[in-house]
């Protein structure tokens, strides 16, 4: 701190001056899009006004138990009263105590309602009645985790995989459990087993990358992140995977804002127009372009060694997109090219120069091209 | 327009409550959608911003509660500290910039609620009454927390005790 006088008045003055980060440029559009989807009919809005002064309290425990009992009623036909589960407000339900499935369902409902200890009682009972059911033993493990007992949690997962070696949820959770306690090699082993059975299991894919990162193995981290992005291109983890790849110096995947959505595309595949992945990526892009209402799509190519190559690629991609889109769903497609490198801003504040590269964005129809080479 | 005017403070509130820019943006969207849904509950005699801020605070609290679920726990290892942006305003003199930088570091060491109370009062100009309503505390409690928060910051700054920043 500077050596000048610091008093409460100065603190208040500094608080008023303190800075804030700018929200992402696409956020306003995204908010407006979400709000427009929420718009209700006049009748719905009037109904909302009528009931807005009343509050209905929903208790998760009660809802969970009611759902479980409804399922039970269907599954078991009738309910015989041998065990009672009491909730607040004087309500109580009965379940068949010697029915493993009933105990399991109630345990799951209680777990959802954050009643971990009670959940454990019912899940333990379910396991006791039917120990060969991998699903019951697995959820007993989840309840142990929720109750803060990782050792017993893992024991349950081991037992569930003993009875069913291909039970992916337990393999994945064993990976999580070892990742959480810092046993990275063990975590990788279980994620690998899960992925051998289900190669698209998202948490095993993503957390494998994370585990490699913890082991300072950036080469394997990169491979794992790319594997994740081969299957998943939407959601925050996809964008996060892209950020991590950029941190590792890998810009094959990029996050773009197209219309109201932030999407992940494989830029390398789109630039390699004779490559095996090009058509697949082109199909992804054309699917997104159809959803850009009232906006024009900009495709900007950069190649610092050969501007003519950037131009050729730009025109070719435009033409191929037009061929794939029917006339009615095609927004204006504008292409630009530069005989220079693209400058990309990164989270660490150090800009990165890319070439060849492709920038994709949308903007409203009334903006001009500022004199760039464009069509 | 309301979104233009308020997206920045709401986004920054979320940024202080979550792990990533993406999550903060998601929650900001949700805050505005929820505000739109509940416009019927907004009483015109109040200022809009404190009402929106209060709603966003609840959303951030809900998110932090849900964060304790299994799914988010898987990724706890990945939580990374995101410092506040350096002030881009070059017109602020060098001493002020240094003071601000130290203040922002100190802010990250405050308990979440204390930090948000100070920000809503001094950065966003909410009255004590509005702060009390937003944080569901009495006016006297709001005054006390504001006073203690400022004193805590002053002590940290005077002692230069702002080195170990940690989020939550």
Image (spheres, coloured by chain):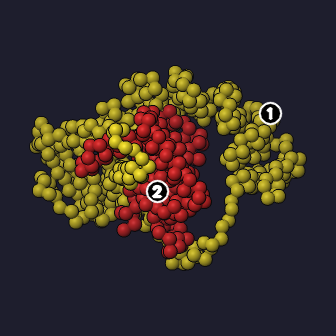
Residue A43, x across and y down, in percent: 54, 78
From the viewer's perspective, tell me whether residue A52 is left or right of residue A36: right
- The residue tagged 1 is A128
Residue A341, x across and y down, in percent: 17, 40
The front one of A360 and B127 is B127
- The residue tagged 2 is B120
Label 2: how many residues lie within 10 Å, few (<14), some (14-19) or many (20+)? many
Residue A106, x across and y down, in percent: 75, 46
Let me know if residue A237 appears in the view: no
Query: Is the Cβ of the residue at disc 1 closer than 8 Å to that at disc 2?
Result: no
Image: A151 above or below A336: above
Please give the label number shown on residue A300: none
SS for tag 1? helix
- The subunit letter for the residue under badge 1 reads A
Q: Are marks 1 and 2 on the same chain?
A: no
Q: Which quadrant of the view contains residue A332?
A: bottom left
The chain that appears yellow in the image is: A
The front one of A248 and A199 is A248
**Which one is closest to the eye, mark 1 or mark 2?**
2
- Chain B hue? red
Q: Tell me the residue at 54%/41% (across/down).
A: B72
- The subunit letter for the residue under badge 2 reads B
SS for tag 2? helix
Q: Residue furthest top?
A: A185
Q: Quadrant of the C terminus of chain A?
A: bottom left
Residue A259, x across and y down, in percent: 33, 57
Q: Tell me the residue at 81%/57% (across/down).
A: A91
């Amino acid at each position: 701190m500077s050596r000048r006088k610091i008093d409460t008045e100065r603190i208040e003055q500094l608080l008023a001056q303190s800075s804030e980060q700018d929200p992402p440029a696409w956020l306003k559009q995204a908010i407006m899009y979400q709000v427009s989807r929420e718009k209700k009919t006049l009748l719905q809005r009037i109904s909302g006004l009528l009931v807005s002064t009343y509050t209905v309290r929903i208790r998760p425990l009660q809802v969970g138990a009611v759902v479980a009992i409804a399922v039970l009623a269907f599954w078991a036909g009738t309910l015989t009263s041998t065990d009672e589960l009491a909730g607040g407000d004087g309500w109580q339900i009965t379940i068949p105590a010697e029915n493993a499935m009933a105990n399991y369902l109630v345990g799951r409902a209680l777990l959802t309602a954050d009643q971990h200890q009670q959940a454990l009682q019912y899940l333990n009972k379910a396991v006791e009645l039917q120990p060969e059911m991998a699903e019951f033993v697995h959820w007993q493990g989840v309840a142990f985790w929720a109750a803060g007992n990782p050792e017993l949690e893992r024991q349950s997962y081991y037992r569930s995989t003993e009875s069913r070696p291909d039970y992916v949820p337990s393999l994945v959770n064993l990976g999580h459990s070892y990742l959480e306690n810092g046993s990275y090699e063990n975590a990788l082993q279980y994620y690998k087993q899960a992925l051998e059975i289900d190669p698209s299991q998202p948490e095993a894919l993503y957390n494998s990358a994370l585990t490699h990162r913890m082991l300072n193995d950036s080469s394997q981290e990169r491979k794992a992140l790319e594997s994740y992005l081969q299957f998943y291109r939407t959601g925050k983890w996809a964008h996060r995977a892209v950020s991590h790849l950029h941190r590792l110096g890998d810009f094959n995947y990029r996050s773009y804002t197209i219309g109201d959505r932030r999407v992940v595309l494989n830029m390398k595949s789109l630039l390699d127009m004779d490559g095996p992945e090009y058509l697949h990526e082109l199909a992804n892009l054309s699917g997104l372009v159809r959803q850009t209402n009232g906006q024009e799509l900009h495709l900007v190519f950069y190649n610092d060694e050969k501007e003519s190559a950037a131009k050729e690629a730009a025109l070719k991609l435009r033409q191929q997109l037009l061929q794939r889109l029917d006339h009615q769903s095609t927004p204006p497609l504008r292409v630009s090219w530069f005989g220079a490198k693209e400058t990309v801003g990164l989270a660490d504040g150090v800009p990165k120069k890319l070439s060849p590269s492709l920038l994709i964005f949308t903007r409203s129809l009334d903006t001009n091209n500022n004199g760039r080479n464009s069509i | 327009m309301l979104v233009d005017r308020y997206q920045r403070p709401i986004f920054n509130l979320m940024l202080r409550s979550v792990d990533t820019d993406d999550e903060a943006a998601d929650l900001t969207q949700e805050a505005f959608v929820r505000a739109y849904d509940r416009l019927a509950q907004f009483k015109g005699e109040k200022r809009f911003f404190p009402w929106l801020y209060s709603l966003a605070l609840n959303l951030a609290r809900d998110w932090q509660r849900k964060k304790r679920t299994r799914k988010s726990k898987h990724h706890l290892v990945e939580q990374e500290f995101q410092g506040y942006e350096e002030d881009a305003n070059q017109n602020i003199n060098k001493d002020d910039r240094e003071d601000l930088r130290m203040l922002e570091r100190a802010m990250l060491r405050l308990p979440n609620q204390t930090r948000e109370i100070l920000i809503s009062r001094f950065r966003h100009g909410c009255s004590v009454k509005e702060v009390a309503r937003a944080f569901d505390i009495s006016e006297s409690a709001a005054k006390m927390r504001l006073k203690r928060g400022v004193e805590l910051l002053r002590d940290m700054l005077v002692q230069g005790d702002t080195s170990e920043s940690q989020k939550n």
